[in-house]
Image (tube, rainbow, N blue to C red):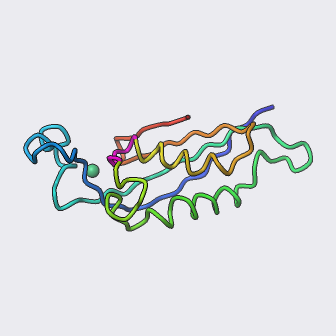
Amino acid sequence: MKVTISRKAHFNAAHRLFVKSWDDKKNESVFGKCSNQYYHGHNYELIVNVTGKVDPITGMVMDLKVLADLIKTEVEDPFDHKNLNMQVPEFADLIPSAENIAVVIYNKLIKHLDKEKTLEIILYETPKNFVKYCG
Ligand code: NI
């Protein structure tokens, strides 16, 4: 019997989407407002889904408090109120698009989960724009 447990989290962060080898005009034509050279912020909403077997003794897939602490340590503490391009090492040479942020979050969290569990990351950059990554 497999069940998915979910935890929501939130962080505010600034970013700029740009390709270093392109000029400002080309970057603006591809990335629009997200290429503003002075950066801008988003209120990111994160949903972390973990799917696995229900332990017959505890009745749990995973302790949600443990998952909440992991998200805090691996995502909220390092990302919240940060400039992703300049302050988060994973994005030093990686464009902090919603897609790449979701992949980075997945890679940071999957390391802590048992092998038989599956992880799904849903990241809202705006209330209407969101991405999903499952590895
Ligand atoms: Ni943006």
Image quadrant occupied by the N terminus: top right
Residue 110 placement, left or right of 27? right
Is any part of residue 81 visible from this angle?
Answer: yes
Residue at 45% x, 52% y: name it.
45
Q: Residue 133's spot in the image, x, y percent?
A: 50, 36
Q: Which residues are magenta?
A: 94-99
Tag count in the figure?
0
Q: Residue 18's spot in the image, x, y percent?
A: 22, 47
Residue at 55% x, 35% y: name it.
134
Asked whether 97 falls inside the magenta stretch, the response is: yes
Residue at 43% x, 65% y: name it.
80
Q: Residue furthest top?
A: 1
| Main SS of residues in magenta | loop
Q: Nearer the viewer, residue 91 or 40?
A: 91
Residue 121 placement, left or right of 131? right
Image quadrant occupied by the C terminus: top right
Q: Residue furthest left?
A: 25
Residue 85 placement, left or right of 88? left
Note whether 130 is above or below 88 in the view shown.
above
